[in-house]
Image (spheres, rainbow, N blue to C red):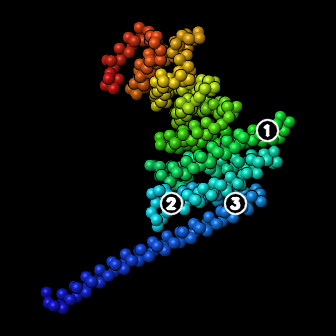
Amino acid sequence: MDQGTQQAHKKEKKGKGKSKKLAKKGKKVVEESTSVGNEKQTNWVLVILKELYLFLEVFPLHQDSFNYTLEILTDLTRFREDFVPDGKAKKKNPGGAEEKITKLAFDTLHRLIQPVLEEPDADSDAHQMVREVFKNLLPSLLMTFDQGATTPIPKYKIHTRDNTLEFLNSLISEIDGIEVSDDNNARKSNKEQLFTSVHALLQHTCAQVPEKADYRNHACQVVASLFGVLPLTVKPRFLAFLSRYSKNAKAAYRLFAVQIAMSLVELSSEGEEQACKALLEIILSRASDKVASVRARSLDSVATLLQLATANSHLKSQVYQLVTLQDNQTDKRQNFLSLLVKRTDDEKCNVRRVAIQALETIGMLSDELVLSKAELRHLVDKCGDSALSIRK
């Protein structure tokens, strides 16, 4: 290679090195300018939200303006795909700025419907405004906003769900706190209508949950949390719906109903005996479902409840009646145990397994021997089951 060629190669190599440096420098400038632009945009959004909040303290919105403002505020309560929690964010891209926007958006959303909560008898259609709020926030609860039910569930959707649930729990508690006198029928009627809107939110959560396990688990947590803040006088209405929902023609609905009932039983407390009884009936009614996955879920819930009852006196008093001769419930006991024995011969291995687990746990509920000799003999026979998991 001659000297001229070598010099040409050196110049080319040097030129490539400079271009790489310039590219890196240019990328850094773009990132910094984008960061500055985003920071300015964030500051403007915060300023506008604060101005809107102050405006709503003085001037209520008409229906047309209300719907438009509600859509914008709902969108601002949701985190974006590039959201990073404040503690894990880099200095150049702080997640705290977006958290400030979502918090202020929720505060402004609350301010938007504050007149309804302060004067629920002032407008006969006031409950409709609250219903619209629930309708707009439902995709946030189900995490179906922004490209639908993607898997795995992105963290920014989970953060959005958590914030939305906290807001709704607080709002329902505020509705429950509305004072109603016996002679103010209009105020009483509107408070009932507000709880009707809450009931509709729970119904739509059950009806629109995606048919994916992760989403069902999160939706179950949502229903349990919202149900927990309802007053005792309102809960029976949802339980009646859940009973109908558990008999729906769609197997996914029946499966989800059992999952919800199980969660609510676990969270039940003293004074909710009737609710607990209704939930147990929902769970047991699906033990003979025509779909094996629903039967397995039902029996698995029964086995879990029997185990929990050994350490929970409140739950034990409810479950105990199903498996003992207490309170002249011999027929119910026989029906319950015969159902479990029947399921141990189910065509599906998973159903047989959870049925056997339930029978094994019954003896832990009392010092008395609940299982009869015939039932114990049936368990022994299962040691020769065709499935290895059953024999074990």
Q: Visible in this render: residue 297?
A: yes
**To which residue does mark 3 refer?**
53
Residue lying furthest bottom = 4
Element assignment for label 1: loop
**To which residue does mark 2 refer?**
95
Residue 177: x percent and y percent?
Answer: 72, 40
Q: Earlier in the sequence, mark 3 or mark 1?
A: 3
- 51 horizontally vs 376: left or right: right
Element assignment for label 2: loop
**To which residue does mark 1 refer?**
180
- Point out which mark residue 140 bears: none
- 316 horizontally vs 344: left or right: right
Q: Quadrant of the N terminus?
A: bottom left
What residue type is disc 1 on?
A: Val
Residue at 44% over, 16% down: 363
Q: Earlier in the sequence, mark 1 or mark 2?
A: 2
Residue 359: x percent and y percent?
Answer: 43, 18
What residue type is disc 2 on?
A: Gly
Q: Marks 3 and 1, Cα distance to the nearest angstrom?
A: 28 Å
What crowding class fits label 3: few (fewer than 14 Cα within 10 Å), some (14-19), or many (20 or more)? some
In the rendered image, the vertical position of residue 202 relative to residue 72, given as above or below:
above
Residue 21: x percent and y percent?
Answer: 34, 78
As rendered, which of 249 and 85 lies closer to the eye?
Answer: 85
Residue at 22% over, 85% down: 10
What crowding class fits label 2: few (fewer than 14 Cα within 10 Å), some (14-19), or many (20 or more)? some
What residue type is disc 3 on?
A: Tyr
